[in-house]
Image (spheres, rainbow, N blue to C red):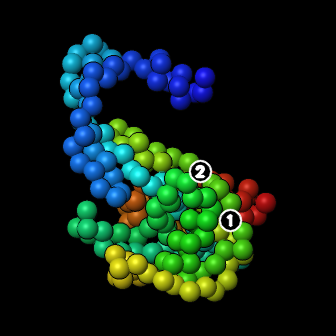
Amino acid sequence: MTDNEDDKKNSPWKTLSTQPVYNNAWIKVEEHQVINPGGTKGIYGKVSFKNQAVGIIPVDGEGNVWLVGQFRYTLNQWSWEIPMGGSPKAEDKIKTARRELEEETGLKAGEVTELLHLHPSNSITDEQGYVYLATDLSEGLQQLEDTEKDIQVKKLAFDDAVKMVQSGEITDAISVAGILYLALNWNQYING
């Protein structure tokens, strides 16, 4: 039995029924009738993503990184982030990371290293996120999708990206986690 099967078997939650609420090419929303760990009946909404989130932090030989900024419809505000996109679950995540890096920034990565795996908002979604490090950078071809036509690319010192996280200028969970993880492990991945 796998860890996930053991977790399901030992869950303190009991699902009584599941009702589909909404489904499109990117997400599925369900309402679950449950008995919670305290023994009370209730409802639980669950959003399932059909892709995995894949972010990539490009770092050059001088310790500079590239961020992308765009207007996020769901927040109705501008957002600075690491380059990222959706990876079909059957697609190799490193392939997705390379593709998103080049599409959004116009950079190619000679070397791609996995940094971390995370669940960006595990109280309402089963979404999984992955963050990679891109090094040995070269020029590629930026090819923005229609939803990304407002993207701005910013090159800055890595320490300045960390300061943007600390000041709240970067709020995207995957970007925050990736930047802080790399900051804590800089010597292992960059100076190692």
Q: Which of the 4 image quarters holds residue 94?
A: bottom right
| Quadrant that contains the C terminus | bottom right
Evaluate if marks 1 and 2 touch, with contact meaning CB atoms under 8 Å apart: no
Is residue 72 depicted above or below 11 in this figure? below
Circle 2 packing at 10 Å, graded few (<14), some (14-19), many (20+), is: some
**Image label count:** 2
Q: Is residue 143 above or below residue 183?
A: below
Identify which residue, 138 or 127, lies in the foreground: 127
Would residue 67 be found to the left or right of residue 93 on screen? Answer: left
* Residue for badge 2: 116
Q: Secondary structure at mark 2?
A: strand
Quadrant occupied by the N terminus: top right
Q: Position of residue 164 (x, y in %)?
A: 44, 66
Q: Is residue 190 above or below residue 24?
A: below
Q: Position of residue 24 (x, y in %)?
A: 29, 56
Residue topped by disc 1 = 112
Q: Mark 1 belongs to which amino acid?
A: Val
- Give whichever of 124, 59 is nearer the camera: 124
Quarter occupied by residue 107: bottom right
